[in-house]
Image (cartoon, helix red, strand yellow):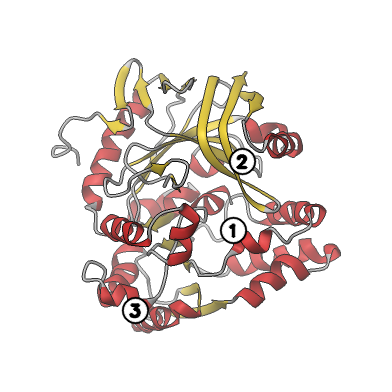
Amino acid sequence: MQAKLLLTGFFLTTSLSLAAQNSSVPTAALVNRLVTTVAHVKAGETVILKGDKSQLDLMDALGEQIHQKGAYPVIMLQSERLAKAAMLSVPEADLLAHHKAIHKLDNKADLTIYFSSNIDYNAINQQVPEAYGEKRRQAMQAFHNGVPENMATFREVYVMLPNQKDAASEGIAYATYEKMILAAMAADYEVMAAKGKQLGALLLTGKQVKVTNPNGTNFSFALAGRPFSINDGVISEADLKSSLEIDRQVSLPTGMLFVSGDESSGKGKIVAVRDRQYGNQGQVKLTNAAYTFENGKVAQATATTNQAFLDKKLKVAEPMATQFGGLMIGLNPALKVLSDTQQDFRPYEAEGMVYIQLGGNDWMGGANKVKDGFALPIENATVTVDGKIILKDGKLVLNSVASVK
């Protein structure tokens, strides 16, 4: 599922002790928020909790309250040993069957709550032989994309708290990282949702979007009158009636607007000064990556670093996987982009951060069902809808949100 792959690219959670020590995210309040406000756990539901040993106490506390709701929690404990076995040791002939088993399990649960671990998955990925990794990617795509079979009750929650590993991977001092993430957890989600609705109303009725940046980005696309989605940290009753996968998924901290566009309309150029894309052997850093679009698809791509990786990524991609898919705008004012030669932090949810989705976009209301895709970051972007500025140099340009319901 594209949305799952997108959300798991975010920085995720840590241990109970950190939550307990920080008054802004007390454990009892976090557990109660997850069960009653975020995911609305109901009697008779099966709830999978995925995390590692550092989150075991937190998952225990969460499971206890899930039982008290008349639902049944299942804790799936992750470890580095199991991660290596899953990523390196499955026989090639059994990769498809292995991922089918994962897919089957995912579709048995009504709700899955993910807690990222301290396991360095990128380091493990770097040990994967390229040919084996490509076969694993194909097997994963076969069963991890498309509308979930259990759509009637399907929900996923990604809980995000700071940890040392993620701070190091982003090149950020831990104290800075911790302070920012905890502030983002405590941000006013109703205000973010209101801002998202204002933006969404313009995008719903608008015709043309243009995204620019002095770095050379000059990209435009046509809107298609499709509904927008807002990741506001709550899976509401309205979300449960939605047929869109993204409406059933939330992350904490959160704050993001999604809208798909006319897939054939993307034209111009997108320049990502700094980016991280994923290959069969983990993350690869790109600098000054420039993508030129024709007829809605990437026609040419260049980068000053790792050009060979970029060439191969586009060569093996299905033709529809490089087609324009949609626009994502961050709404969380507590999250900041920190991007320079040392820091490499561009959270999707940071207020004013823009990502352009390529490839499969049916999960966000689009028509492209291809089981592949990726997103391109545009920092400090200016975005217009039919000539009206909604984002200027990475800052939202909106009227008061007080009247937005």
Mark 1 or mark 3: whose residue is earlier in sequence: 3
Q: Quadrant of residue 353?
A: top left
Residue 303: horizontal and vertical position, in percent?
A: 62, 30
Q: Is residue 384 above or below residue 287?
A: above
Query: Tag on residue 17?
Result: 3
Give the residue at x 46% y 23%: 215
- The reply to whether discs 2 and 1 touch (Cβ–Cβ < 8 Å) is no
Q: Is residue 159 above or below residue 229?
A: below
Q: For mark 2, what is the residue?
A: 373
* Amino acid at circle 2: Gly
Mark 2 or mark 1: whose residue is earlier in sequence: 1
Residue closest to the eye, 202 or 236: 202
Q: For mark 1, what is the residue?
A: 149
- The reply to whether discs 1 and 3 touch (Cβ–Cβ < 8 Å) is no
Q: Secondary structure at mark 3?
A: helix
* Cα distance between the residues tagged 2 and 3: 37 Å
* Amino acid at circle 3: Ser
Residue closest to the eye, 372 or 101: 372
Q: Secondary structure at mark 2?
A: strand
Give the residue at x 51% y 70%: 118
* Amino acid at circle 1: Glu
Residue closest to the eye, 77 or 146: 77
Q: Secondary structure at mark 1?
A: loop
